[in-house]
Amino acid sequence: MVQSIHKYRNELQKIIDYGGSLNETTIRRCFISLVNDFAEEKNLKLVEELEYKTPQGTTIYPDGTLKDRFRLSYGITKPKTQRIILIKKSRIKPVSTIR
């Protein structure tokens, strides 16, 4: 787990060094890789760009959704905010921030 975080931070530093930017597009792959490293320990897989309807009726396309082999959703990711968000009883609640 610690190795995954170090790998993520090293990749972010390389992006800054080579590109000078940490916008959502540039960090997306690094963040998804980090989430997948953690998800595999729980037998989950990050599936990208699934469509969801919010309780307000709008449609969102999170960058990734944590799913199990029964297709149950356990969370969504948004690299822009570098947060893992859990889906709980039809409400979306932020649980942790990785910095």
Image: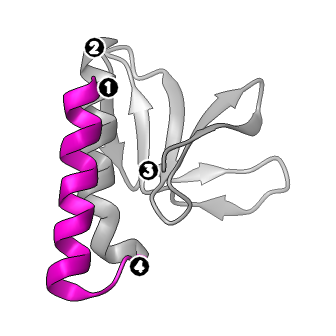
Q: Which amino acid does label 3 sit on?
A: Leu
Q: Report the front residue among 16 and 78.
A: 16
Asked if labels 2 and 1 touch by Cβ distance under 8 angstroms, the answer is yes
Q: Residue at x 53, y 33 (%)?
A: 75
Asked if labels 1 and 4 touch by Cβ distance under 8 angstroms, the answer is no
Sequence-wise, the earlier of marks 4 and 3 is 4
Sequence-wise, the earlier of marks 4 and 1 is 4
Q: Residue at x 40, y 27 (%)?
A: 67
Q: Report the front residue among 24 and 49.
A: 24
- Please tell me whether the stretch drawn in magenta is mainly helix, strand or loop: helix
Residue at the right extreme of this rendering: 56
Is 77 drawn above or below residue 80 in the view shown? above
Sequence-wise, the earlier of marks 2 and 3 is 2
Mark 4–mark 2 distance (CA, rounded to whole Å): 28 Å
**Which residue position holds label 1?**
38
**Which residue position holds label 4?**
23
* Image position, residue 25 (x, y; %): 34, 75
Q: Element under label 2?
A: helix
Magenta-highlighted residues: 1-23
Q: What residue type is labelled 4?
A: Asn
